[in-house]
Image (spheres, rainbow, N blue to C red):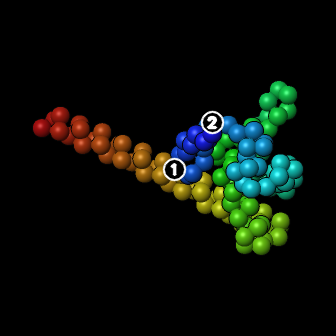
Amino acid sequence: MARRAIPTDASGLPDKPYFKIGEAARLCAVKPYVLRYWETEFKSVRPQKTRSQQRLYRKRDVEPLLKIRHLLYEKRFTIEGARVAAEVFLRTELQRVDEDAHHDTLRTATGMIHQREVAFV
């Protein structure tokens, strides 16, 4: 019996709002205890928890995990080196998001001004 393909988004992650720790661990190709350890070492790894204290990872939680895994397993960084690199990566990502939002606001304002100018003509 063939498995059905799971729909994915542009990032390649399954199109789901939340992942349990086992699912997030499979996506990152590590064991669940590794994710729990990374929670103690990296500020950016803070999944939500249910009332029963089960971890729920969102897509925006899994993406830094994939970056951390890349730094540790493929680039062979130490935990400390990966921590610094992950913080720099996240800081630049946040700045990019802020800049994108700023540009979107400017485009919207420019469009509104143009519409008003056309209305007065």
Task: Check contact, mark 2 vs mark 1: CB within 8 A.
Answer: no
Which residue is under mark 2?
17
Q: Residue at x 48, y 52 (%)?
A: 100
| 3D distance between C-alphas at marks 2 and 1 | 14 Å
User: Which numbered disc, 2 or 1, marks the residue that appears first in the sequence?
Assistant: 1
Work out which quarter of the rendered image holds the N terminus and state it: top right
Tell which of 121 and 41 is nearer to you: 41
Is 120 left or right of 112, judged from the image as shown?
Answer: left
Is residue 112 shown above or below 106?
above
Residue 21 spot, x, y in % from top left:
78, 42
Q: Which mark is residue 28?
A: none
Q: Secondary structure at mark 1?
A: loop
Q: Residue at x 67, y 37 (%)?
A: 18
Which residue is under mark 1?
10
Residue reaching furthest to the top: 51
Residue 86 in sight in this render: no
Residue reaching furthest to the bottom: 76
Tag 2: residue type?
Answer: Pro
Is 44 left or right of 41, judged from the image as shown?
Answer: left
Tag 1: residue type?
Answer: Ala
Q: Residue at x 39, y 48 (%)?
A: 106
Q: How many neighbours does mark 1 have within 10 angstroms: few (below 14), some (14-19), or many (20 or more)?
A: few
Is 15 left or right of 38, judged from the image as shown?
Answer: left
Tell which of 68 and 42 is nearer to you: 68
Residue 47 spot, x, y in % from top left:
76, 42
